[in-house]
Image: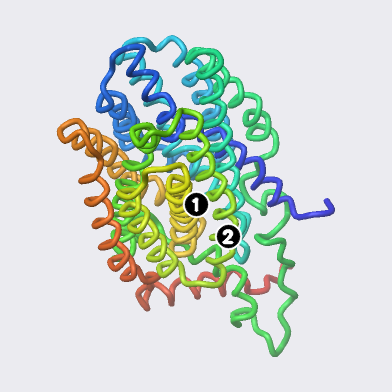
């Protein structure tokens, strides 16, 4: 091919991340007011569907990670798109809380686990040096999906009906993502006789460049120096990332679920609220590529700390929002956080723990993210229903984000014990040792 096939894999798996945004919280936020008006549901009840989806994904996330490592990302992505399309379509007939919760929770399981973990894992296997920009492109597709589904929902509801909106979303999921996930995703570059980043194989060793030299094992180290799940879970950085993911998505998800209703409370029309949310996704789209580039230049934990600072600023700034202009400023900050958190988390786990067990490691670590996503929206809904205002919510969320910006700096790359490094290098040297057949 005239270009590296890894970019085809990125685009194909990115289509699943695009589809994953169908049940995104900024899509749901467009539906909150119409659902409450048509069925009389409270905001706590509606936002509880996000928590139900997070709890369902919490149970299934380790199994999804295991399935990705065991069967590959492609079958997981294909099944995910099928489930997602059917779930979103069935929302057209979800007129009681139970059916609404079942359908939305099923879609959110795909949103939380199989689509992002599968896409980022397969992309991380194709790229090492260019991993930042590859995963940045993955989440660029997701940001575009957030923009498309938000505007599609608002226009379908405003000009037709909620039922038409749900059916339209399901149709887009099937059309955009099913064929690329099925036909174009390849698990590893080695399956096509390639190497990560389209690197060339090392030249045969010379007298001065023995089989165990650094130059000959450098390509293999990036793949063979992978941590198992049990090894990763015994490190301090794993648990810092686990709890920081929980804090990040408690605040970010808790804000985003209610942001559409908050804009309406501040006097914005449904269309202007959708425009502000869509502007957030536009910033997120640009930010996904930008953060990917930044992470090839800046240490990941420092970039993560910057994202937490931006999240804190956005939470406090929401206390001042009272016009379309200020809503757009808030949306820009929120969009930057959304792109940064997705890209940085995916890259940190791949860089810290390697390629081989990345699905299992992400599957377990995602439970921290899911706990945060389960708690954040419900907590914000309860505080709003009891006080009639989001002011306390934004103060609390801003404080959590500011504290986390300091804690995450402790997440330094893990270091293997010396004995384990010695055994690993011995295995690599044995693999590279020339063989002579009789």
The residue at the point 61 percent across, 59 percent down is: 133
Direction from residue 244 to residue 277 in the image, left or right: right
Estimate the x, y position of residue 31 in percent, counting from the top left.
42, 24
Between 196 and 45, the one lying in front of the other is: 45
Quadrant of the rendered image containing residue 45 = top left
How far across and down, in percent of the image, does residue 326 sit?
A: 43, 48
Q: Nearer the viewer, residue 287 or 421?
A: 287
Q: Where's residue 437, x and y in %?
A: 72, 67
Circles 2 and 1, Cβ within 8 Å, touching? The answer is: yes
Question: Which SS class for mark 2?
Answer: helix
- The disc placed on residue 290 is 2
Q: Is residue 293 left or right of residue 184?
A: left
Above or below residue 415? Residue 63 is: above
- In the shown orientation, is residue 206 left or right of residue 52? right
Here the colouring is: rainbow
Pick the quarter of the image with the C terminus: bottom right
Q: Which one is nearer the viewer's eye here, 83 or 294?
A: 294
In this view, 183 is above or below 229: above
Disc 2 crowd rating (10 Å Cα; few below 14, some 14-19, many 20+) is many
N-term-proximal mark, 2 vs 1: 2
The residue lying furthest to the right in this view is 2
- What mark, if any, has residue 305 been given in the picture? none
- Is 320 left or right of 145, judged from the image as shown? left
Mark number displayed over residue 339: 1
> Can you give x and y, in whole percent of width and height, for residue 220 in the image?
59, 68
Q: Is residue 436 visible?
A: yes
Work out how far the residue at label 2 is from the one at label 1, CA to CA, in angstroms. 9 Å
Helix, strand or loop for disc 1: helix
């Amino acid at each position: 091919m005239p270009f590296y096939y890894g970019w085809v894999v990125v685009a194909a798996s990115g289509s699943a991340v695009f589809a994953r945004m169908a049940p995104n919280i900024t899509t749901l936020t467009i539906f909150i007011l119409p659902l409450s008006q048509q069925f009389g549901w409270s905001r706590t009840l509606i936002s509880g569907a996000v928590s139900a989806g997070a709890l369902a994904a919490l149970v299934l996330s380790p199994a999804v990670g295991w399935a990705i490592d065991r069967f590959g990302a492609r079958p997981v992505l294909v099944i995910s798109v099928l489930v997602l399309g059917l779930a979103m379509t069935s929302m057209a007939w979800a007129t009681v809380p139970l059916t609404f919760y079942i359908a939305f929770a099923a879609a959110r399981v795909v949103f939380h686990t199989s689509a992002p973990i599968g896409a980022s894992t397969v992309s991380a296997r194709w790229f090492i040096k260019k991993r930042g920009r590859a995963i940045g492109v993955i989440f660029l597709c997701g940001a575009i999906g957030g923009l498309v589904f938000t505007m599609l929902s608002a226009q379908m509801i405003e000009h037709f009906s909620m039922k038409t909106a749900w059916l339209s979303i399901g149709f887009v999921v099937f059309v955009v993502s099913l064929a690329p996930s099925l036909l174009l995703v390849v698990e590893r570059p080695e399956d096509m006789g390639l190497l990560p980043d389209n690197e060339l194989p090392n030249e045969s060793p010379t007298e001065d460049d023995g089989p165990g030299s650094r130059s000959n094992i450098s390509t293999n180290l990036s793949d063979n120096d992978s941590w198992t799940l049990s090894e990763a879970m015994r490190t301090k950085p794993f648990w810092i990332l686990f709890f920081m993911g929980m804090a990040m998505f408690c605040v970010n998800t808790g804000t985003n679920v209610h942001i559409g209703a908050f804009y309406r409370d501040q006097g914005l029309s449904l269309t202007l609220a959708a425009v502000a949310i869509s502007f957030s996704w536009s910033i997120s789209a640009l930010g996904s590529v930008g953060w990917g580039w930044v992470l090839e230049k800046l240490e990941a934990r420092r970039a993560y700390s910057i994202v937490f600072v931006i999240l804190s600023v956005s939470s406090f700034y929401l206390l001042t929002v009272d016009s379309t202009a200020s809503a757009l400023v808030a949306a820009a900050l929120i969009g930057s956080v959304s792109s940064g958190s997705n890209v940085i988390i995916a890259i940190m786990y791949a860089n810290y723990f390697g390629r081989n067990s990345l699905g299992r490691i992400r599957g377990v670590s995602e439970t921290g993210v899911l706990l945060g996503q389960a708690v954040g929206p419900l907590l914000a809904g309860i505080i709003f229903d009891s006080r009639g205002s989001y002011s306390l919510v934004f103060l609390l969320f801003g404080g959590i984000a500011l504290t986390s910006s300091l804690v995450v700096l402790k997440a330094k790359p893990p270091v293997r014990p010396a004995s384990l490094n010695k055994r690993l290098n011995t295995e690599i040297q044995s693999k590279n040792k020339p063989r002579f057949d009789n």
